Amino acid sequence: MAARVVDAIDELKKLAGAEIGVTDWLLITQERIRQFAEATDDRQWIHVDEERAQRESPYSTTIAHGFLTLSLLSHFLKQAIEIRGARMGVNYGLNRVRFPAPVRAGTRIRARVRLESAKDFPGGMEAVFSFTIECEGSEKPCCVAEWIVRYYAP
């Protein structure tokens, strides 16, 4: 998918309330899950012990950390929109995050990105994006989140 291009942060106001785009699929491998477990010191068996997960987990395999899925928001946002004319963008926080379904190792995920609002603040524009992260083959999303990003004028 080609990112939607916005030449100036003020143009975000025109997109408020609209879906920005649907990203490409991203494969969540066991190796990615393992690397995330190492980076965060969260080595719970449901993430890293493939044999035990096959025996004991209701998912019959390992699953990705919810925070791994959440950490991919910036990856997906870059695929959905390119904002030119900003000096920088800063993660301002999250309003709401839920993980309705697991991401099994070997599953592909993608994001539906919507711009909920865009409002001025001194020196820039604050954007609230909503994400629905879909798992291929699942009816329920694996993550829904609202992310606030502040873009600063040049």
Image: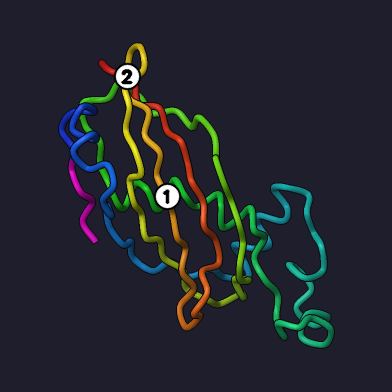
- The one nearer the camera, 144 or 106, is 144
For residue 119, above or below residue 1:
above
Dot 1: few (<14), some (14–19), or many (≥20) neighbours within 10 Å? many
Residue picked out by circle 1 = 130
Q: Amino acid at mark 1?
A: Ser
Question: CA–CA distance between discs 1 and 2?
Answer: 20 Å
- In the drawing, what numbered circle is on residue 92? none
Residue 82, image quadrant? top left
Q: Is the Cβ of the residue at disc 1 closer than 8 Å to that at disc 2?
A: no
Dot 2: few (<14), some (14–19), or many (≥20) neighbours within 10 Å? some
Task: Give the extent of the magenta segment.
Answer: 1-5
Going by the picture, which residue comes out furthest to the top? 122
Quadrant, the C terminus = top left
Q: Amino acid at mark 2?
A: Gly
> Residue 118, percent across and down?
32, 33
For residue 76, above or below residue 29:
above
Q: SS at mark 1?
A: strand
Residue 3 forms part of the magenta stretch: yes
Residue picked out by circle 2 = 124
Give me the residue at 55% from left, 39% from top: 94
> Residue 30, percent across and down?
63, 70
Going by the picture, which residue comes out furthest to the left? 7
Give me the residue at 49% from left, 73% from top: 135
Residue 44 forms part of the magenta stretch: no
Quadrant, the N terminus = bottom left
For residue 148, above or below residue 98:
above
> Residue 137, percent across and down?
47, 83
Residue 15, image quadrant? top left
Dominant secondary structure, magenta: loop
Q: Between disc 1 and disc 2, whose residue precedes? A: 2
Report whether 36 appears left or right of 87.
Answer: right
